[in-house]
Image (cartoon, rainbow, N blue to C red):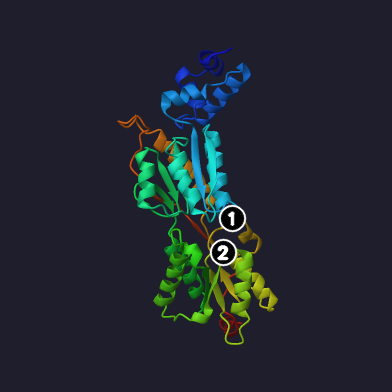
Amino acid sequence: MAGIKEVASRAGLSVATVSRALSGKSNVSSKSRRLAQEAARELGFVPSYHASSLASGRNHNIGLVVPNVQRWYFSSVLEGVSETLLDAGYDLTLYNVGEQPERRNSILTDFLLRKRLDAVIAVALVLSEEEIGQLLAVHRPIVVIGGALPGASTIRIDDEGLAKMATSHLIGLGHTRIAHITGDAGLNRDFKLPQLRQKGFAAAMAAAGLGFRPEWHATADFTIQGAYAAGRRLLGTPTERPTAVFAASDEMAVGVMLAARDFGLRVPEDLSVVGIDGHELAETFGLTTVSQDPRGQGKLAAATALALLDGAGRDPDGGPAVTAAQDQEYPTEFVIRHSTAVPPDLAATTA
């Protein structure tokens, strides 16, 4: 059977480069990785991951913990993480904790303590000081998407600032009767995303001298169906209707647009709608939104985890070296489409 020297000769690379490429280390060019993999395949060379694990202290396996993989945002993050890890030769173990916190506890106290994972990427989950301590105690890097945690590298967006920007866009068009659809209380558990976006909405309204109207504040579950029902209640009132809605997610914005159609309201002539997320449906519905690129966030999280694992040397206890935690704000894009326009009364005066 061919050995690593034969693979290196066939690929035209050094033995060290081939070893790094086939062991999944990230400090190898994509071309070199491809040449090494092709040569290994042609020669029937299969690296011993067991021996590699013993030598490096790694399992070439990174865990991804998400609340609900069926939701668009989390599945998009998963796609980005998976793509990056596969390219680096790492396995991915997915933990879909759902509404059962005991599942998360088993991940932290069982799989990690038994060193099945080299690193953990947690998405939109608040970890307690005790849970973070468990991770740090076994010298495993933690990368978090969605909010800052002590001791963890963080990838986040400015939810409050982006909500303020989206609301200010409506105000800038001349809207003063602006409603807000936010998440229900259960969705505020981890990183309080709905609360942050609601805070940004309130800040923009206050800065413009606009009051908060409780009847124009609705809650839903961040789904199209939930927001459709909330939107029907909001827009079906016999009293004065809002001329614009800021929804805390694109899916809820789409739900509001469907509800408006039921009442014969045209978007944007009668009702302007703006969301946040950059959902794949936003372009289809012509929705003005803030695109946060969850797939890209997943790719960055995986690359960050790999970089932490490839830190210089080892720690005194023999585990992989973990460099200082980073706090990275992921770039977003404000995309203006045709779901927003000047309010009806202002449009009538300028017609």
Q: Residue at the bottom extreme? A: 239
The disc at residue 201 is none
Give the structural element (helix, strand or loop) at label 2: loop
Label of residue 222 in the image: 2
Element class at badge 1: loop
- In the displayed structure, 275 sits above or below 141; it is below
> What's the residue at 55%, 46% (across, down)?
78
Which quadrant of the view contains residue 209?
bottom left
Classify mark 1: residues with Cα within 10 Å, few (<14), some (14-19) or many (20+): few
From the viewer's perspective, is residue 93 above or below residue 265?
above
Q: Residue 70 appears at what percent x and percent y?
A: 60, 53
Q: Amino acid at mark 1?
A: Arg
Please say if the residues under marks 1 and 2 sit with CB atoms less than 8 Å apart.
yes
From where the camera sits, is residue 303 visible? no
N-terminal of the pair, mark 1 or mark 2, is 1
Residue that mark 1 sits on: 71
Q: Nearer the viewer, residue 262 or 332?
A: 262
Foreground residue among 235 and 275: 235
Amino acid type indicated by mark 2: Phe
Can residue 108 be seen here?
yes
Graded by Cα atoms within 10 Å as few (under 14), some (14 to 19) or many (20 or more), the crowding at tag 2 reads: many
Choose between 272 and 219: the one closer to the eye: 219
Q: Where 5 sits versus 183, above or below?
A: above
Q: Position of residue 180 (x, y in %)?
A: 52, 73
Q: Is residue 126 left or right of residue 249?
A: left
User: Which residue is pictured at 53% across the width and 62% down the height?
Assistant: 276
Q: Quadrant of the C terminus?
A: bottom right
